Image (tube, rainbow, N blue to C red):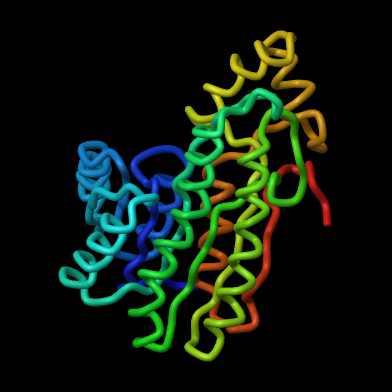
Amino acid sequence: MSMQDQVAIVTGAASGIGRAIAHRLAREGAHVVIADLALPAAEKTVAEFAAEGLAATAIAMDVSDERQVEEGIAAVLRKLGRIDVLVSNAGIQIVHPLEDFPLADWRRMLAIHLDGAFLTTRACLKPMYAAGRGSIVYIGSVHSKEASKLKAPYVTAKHGLIGLAKVVAKEGAAHGVRANTVCPGFVRTPLVEKQIPEQAKALGISEEAVIRDVMLKETVDGEFTTVEDVAEAVLFFAAAGSNAMTGQSLIVSHGWCME
């Protein structure tokens, strides 16, 4: 499985899971585009990759903003001439009990996770269709398959990504474009670190209990998924040499969810 000389856009790639994905694809020879809301962080990531001899470009992108997405993808095409892979990773987390969930927070969550996936997909499909090839990988979650308390919009959005991937797989097949979803368990990123005290407060339990009895309770070994685990799964889908590998979801969760 080689990514040599391919152009791969990874959203939310200046930190956390997205950065690990971009780094893994770059190590396989891809020119990765670090698309992130925080341009200085994206540029820093590009500099760090360059120090390792890896090819990368930084662009500013709010994935929920149609104009920024369209202009960002157009800039990539002008500079690099092609788009082979899109990894739709950008996301945030907001937790509240459903009866208290502010509508503004609900809409923000869906805008980033679902609108962002739609907008970046739509923009990338045009050059992919023209080239007759492409691979789109959505970063879902175990919450694409299961549910947890306090996360109504997150669970809703992550379920939706699997549906979007299936539609893209069906529509893209005639143009050589595949679409799949990677579904990680809890990965101890800054996003998850932030959730621990929030959930402890909302559930009235200790932070240790959140980790043990909420986040890792259903795993087979009580272990967090790592960013490297997720990156390997993304590489598997992105670089797959077979068009048979489309419309699928792969759970990476230490056995939390098995199906």
Q: Along the horizontal axis of the image, is 252 left or right of 2?
A: right
Identify which residue is drawn at 21% across, 50% down. Answer: 50
| Residue 191 placement (x, y as % from top left) | 50, 30
| Residue 136 placement (x, y as % from top left) | 49, 68
Q: Along the horizontal axis of the image, is 66 left or right of 85?
A: left
Residue furthest toward the left? 79
Residue 121 against residue 112 in the figure, above or below: below
Residue 259 against residue 80 in the figure, above or below: above
Please identify the quarter of the rendering in which residue 181 is found.
Answer: bottom right
Identify which residue is drawn at 76% across, 40% down. Answer: 147
- Say which quadrant the C terminus sits in: bottom right
Please identify the quarter of the rendering in which residue 240 is found.
Answer: bottom right
Residue in the foreground of this view, choosing between 64 and 207:
64
Please identify the quarter of the rendering in which residue 2 is found.
Answer: bottom left
| Residue 182 placement (x, y as % from top left) | 61, 56
Count of marks, rendered view: 0
Identify which residue is drawn at 26% across, 43% down. Answer: 42
| Residue 22 placement (x, y as % from top left) | 39, 53
Residue 190 against residue 71 in the figure, above or below: above
Identify which residue is drawn at 69% across, 51% down. Answer: 144
Q: Along the horizontal axis of the image, is 213 left or right of 178?
A: right
